[in-house]
Amino acid sequence: MAILEARGVCKRFSTPKGTISALDGFDLEVDDGEFLAILGPSGCGKSTFLHMVGGFDRISDGQILANGDVITRPGRDRGMMFQGYSLFPWATLAENIEWPMKIGGAPKARREARVQELLTLIGLPQGGPMYPNQLSGGMKQRVALARMLALEPKIMLMDEPFGALDAQNRELLQEELGKIWAQFRRTVLFVTHDIDEAVALATRIVVFTSRPGRIKLDIKVDRKGMGFVEFRKSQQFFELRTQLWESLREEVIKARQMDNSK
């Protein structure tokens, strides 16, 4: 059953050189519980689409529906995690994680218990009194993930959340996110430029065309019961990665040609 539907979505921007269409006639359905990775060249509308799903950006034409309701503004059913470290620097880790529950009116005892559950889940059971400036980048993103989980959204929107991390921490966090998704089975829309990351995490991957963005390739990922590490070493992983790169490479070249013609 589709939890998210995009119908004929268009997004246009006015620039000094004229109007640019980031998305045009864009259609997509996402089923409840899917982990959907979104790949595409720079400027194809990936992050723009995610922000429109989040209710942070207006649609020029068309509709995006969540659970059958047209999205017009942000809502508690959709949580957003950004590439940057978006924690409140003046608040402790516990206060950062507690924040969405507090503004939602959850009782204090429930908030405190849930914060401890989430700190334990991300491997920082004693980290509640700490502040963000005491953490590494990888740890900050763990806390940002815990804060999004505290919201208990039906749809988790992730815009290159591991893009600023070093390769080692990035791969460890991918593995941890995969385990967390398997536990909670929330619907995830995950924007990334990293093909390996998309293949390692997603149950379904879509490739956007160069601007204006549309769906060029839409494929399911079947891990055949393999775990994260085992799947990354499999022949299937490398075959799928090759297929995605061949499709994506054409669009990256088109995007470059478009930029060079300006």
Image: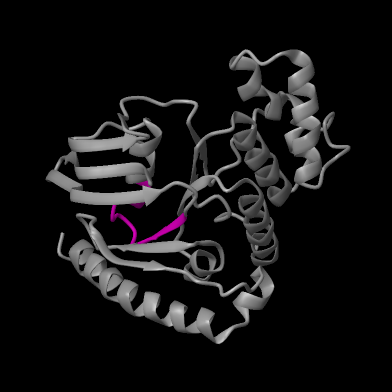
Farthest residue to the front: give it.
1
Up-down relation of residue 110 to residue 205 (above or below): above
The spot of residue 159 in percent (x, y) is 47, 48
Q: Is residue 189 left or right of residue 23?
A: right
* Applied colour scheme: one colour
The spot of residue 237 in percent (x, y) is 53, 79
The spot of residue 122 in percent (x, y) is 75, 46
Say which quadrant the C terminus sits in: bottom left
Q: Is residue 172 left or right of residue 218?
A: right
The image quadrant of residue 163 is: bottom right
The image quadrant of residue 121 is: top right
Residue in the image at 18% along x and 41% along y? 12
Residue in the image at 62% along x and 72% along y? 225
Residue in the image at 62% along x and 13% along y? 105
- Residue 144 in the magenta stretch? The answer is no
The spot of residue 84 in percent (x, y) is 56, 43
Residue in the image at 88% along x and 37% along y? 126
Q: Which residues are magenta?
A: 35-48
Up-down relation of residue 64 to residue 224 (above or below): above
Up-down relation of residue 235 to residue 223 (above or below): below
